[in-house]
Amino acid sequence: MGGLGNGHRGGISPPLMIGTLIACIMFLGFNYWVSSSRNLELLELQTKLYELEDQVRRGAAERGVAELKKTEFQEEIMRQKEQLNHMETLYKRQLESSCHGNLKNLKNKLTYDM
């Protein structure tokens, strides 16, 4: 009878084999616990990464909107400056023509009164 162990019959495992099996189960349990905790850390890091990517996307979108508004405001300022320059030019022309007309009238009065 070629059984394992110390020659006992009845299926009782030797203590060394039971100890080895318990050590293997404990080793595998510890490895499972370590790997699952690492997986949780990786999942947390991945979640944080997704959140940061979302923040970056929102920031880029907000920056794009802000740049568009800035461009629109700059264009509006340029249009208003052009209108102001045009109005100043018209006002100066009117003032010059008015002054020129008044000066002509005064000269005519002076020459008439003399």
Image: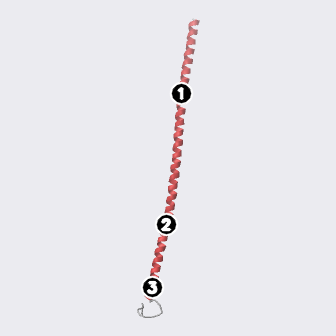
Looking at the picture, which amino acid does disc 3 mark?
Answer: Gly
> Which numbered dot is residue 94?
none
Q: Which residue is mark 3?
A: 19
Within the image, what quadrant is residue 109 found in?
A: top right
Q: Quadrant of the C terminus?
A: top right
Q: Name the one closer to the observer, 102 or 14.
A: 14
Looking at the picture, which amino acid does disc 1 mark?
Answer: His
Helix, strand or loop status at disc 2: helix
Q: Which residue is mark 2?
A: 41
Looking at the picture, which amino acid does disc 2 mark?
Answer: Glu
Q: What x and y, as percent, mark residue 81?
A: 53, 32
Q: From this viewpoint, which residue is outermost toward the left?
A: 2
Q: Which residue is mark 1?
A: 86
Q: What x and y, as percent, mark residue 39?
A: 48, 68
- Decide: few, some or many residues near mark 3? Use Cα within 10 Å; few <14, some 14-19, many ≥20: few
Lower sequence index among marks 2 and 1: 2
Work out whether 90 lies above or below 43: above
Left or right: 108 as drawn, with respect to 17: right
Q: Real-space Cα distance between discs 2 and 1?
A: 67 Å
Lower sequence index among marks 1 and 3: 3
Q: From this viewpoint, which residue is outermost toward the top?
A: 114
Q: Quadrant of the N terminus?
A: bottom left
